[in-house]
Image (cartoon, rainbow, N blue to C red):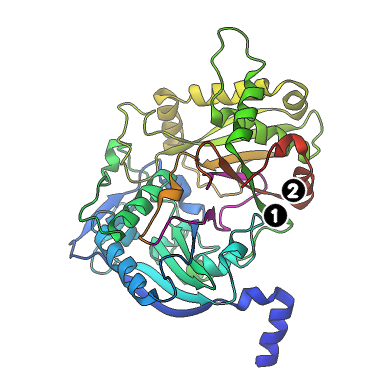
Amino acid sequence: MAADNGKKQQEGGEKEKMVKVTNKSVVVPRKELGRRECPLVTFDLPYLTFYYNQKLLLFKGQGGIEENWEEMMGKMKESLQEILVDFYPLAGRLGKDEEGVVRVVCDADNVGVEVVEAVAAGVGVAELGEDESPTLLQEIVPYTGVLNLEGFCHPLLAVQFTKLRDGLAIGCAFNHAILDGHSTWHFMNTWAEICRGATSISVPPFHDRTKARNTRVKLDLPSPGKPLCSERDVSAPPQMREKIFRFSGSAIDKIKLNVNSSLSNGSKPFSTFQSLGVHIWRAITRARHLNPEDYTVFTIFADCRKRIDPPMSESYFGNLIQAVFTVTAAGALLAQSPGFGASLVQKAIETHDSKAIDGRNKEWEAAPVLFQWKDAGQNCVAVGSSPRFQVYDIDFGWGKPERVRSGRNNKFDGMVYLYQGKGGGKSIDVEISLEVQAMGNLEKDEEFLMEEQE
């Protein structure tokens, strides 16, 4: 057996075997909640066949992580118990009501968050924070390759604390069928707030999903039995690379200035997101070496909290996003000024109002479709997350994160995640998944790279 393990280490790389699990537990809400249910509505249901959404926070060894590990773990679990009282859907499981409509059930038989403690003494924070995603991520962030649909038999939140050589990694896997990125970071910031010593939650979550969409849609789902919960695809898509490109505030300013330079008098200026979005879209299109007549799609996962009528509170806890698309020929996108592509993105965003959202929901409810993460379309660039999320303000009591990134789930050719830059200000980190050859081309594209900085 030892010889076999040694061979696997040589073939797969030594780091893949450097994570040792030391403890597993289930954390439940601090007080008895009775039975609580939360329906999944039209904004939630299409994500059942996506994978769990994974996030990774890396902390350097300030604050005595090594010396105070047991105390830290105690505080983390206690504060998690505390906030699960308010964020109770994360402590539940997926279930169906008597009519077969999917919901979250939180009761004595369906409660608890999976918490894993591990050690990777030979791995440093810098290694996990490298721009190129290491294969070790699937050992650090839980539930790689686990579908949201498996929330019928798995916790809806799993957390792994890994003690590193010089710090701590916190890997989280959230069931994407019950919350979006906005709600994810609302939860994370609240958890940190309580762990630091706050006696109450500053922004309680709002749970009434019927206010967002009061619909009941019965889906023909695969049975959540043993085969569903045991089969895994834990490997990244073949011939893919994942890398973070870091843009300083000055680079973002130059990108925005360049995209807006072709505006005619009286035209609405392009936002930072629209400018950066078209900058990325054009660069990836160049990197793919598409033919001029090939179509390319730009997709945005838009937050609809302020778009629906009436608008929803920022504290709404759930999914309130919809995919917004625009498409053009590669030749048209690249031959014209960046303002051409930015105008397409701007129009797609601005026309996605309450009427469009309602129409999209009605269309889906009439003929429900369960999408997969890879159904984004041909030559797609899809943008998720947002630099507006204050990910570097998440301080559990031992300092702010050194790096924040996503795990390996829901990655496909052209998937992009935007994060606040660690340097603050206008800096933005752009995490891109791309086919190997195209990524190599992108890395050499000086027009795209601008003044890439920490």
Q: Which residue is mark 2?
A: 439
Specify whether residue 50 is painted magenta.
Answer: no
Residue segment shown in magenta? 398-422
* Residue lying at 35% horizontally and 60% vertically, measured from the top left: 397
Residue 66 % position (x, y): 44, 75
* Residue 97 visible, this orientation: no
Task: Give the amino acid type for the residue marked by disc 1 in the picture.
Answer: Arg
Q: Which residue is mark 1?
A: 241
Q: Is residue 50 above or below residue 261?
A: below
* Residue lying at 38% horizontally and 51% vertically, measured from the top left: 178
Question: Which mark is first along the chain, 2 or 1?
Answer: 1
In which image quadrant can residue 233 be found? Answer: bottom right
Main secondary-structure element of the magenta-colored stretch: loop
Residue 56 % position (x, y): 50, 59
Q: Is residue 350 left or right of residue 13?
A: left
Specify whether residue 406 is painted magenta.
Answer: yes
Task: Give the amino acid type for the residue marked by disc 2 in the picture.
Answer: Met
Residue 244 % position (x, y): 63, 49
Residue 121 % position (x, y): 55, 77
Q: Is residue 205 above or below residue 95?
A: above
Front residue of this view, candidates 116 and 128: 128
Quadrant where the image shows the N terminus = bottom right
Q: Are marks 1 and 2 in contact (CB under 8 Å)?
A: yes
In which image quadrant can residue 284 be found? Answer: top right
Q: Is residue 126 left or right of residue 180?
A: right
The number of discs equals 2
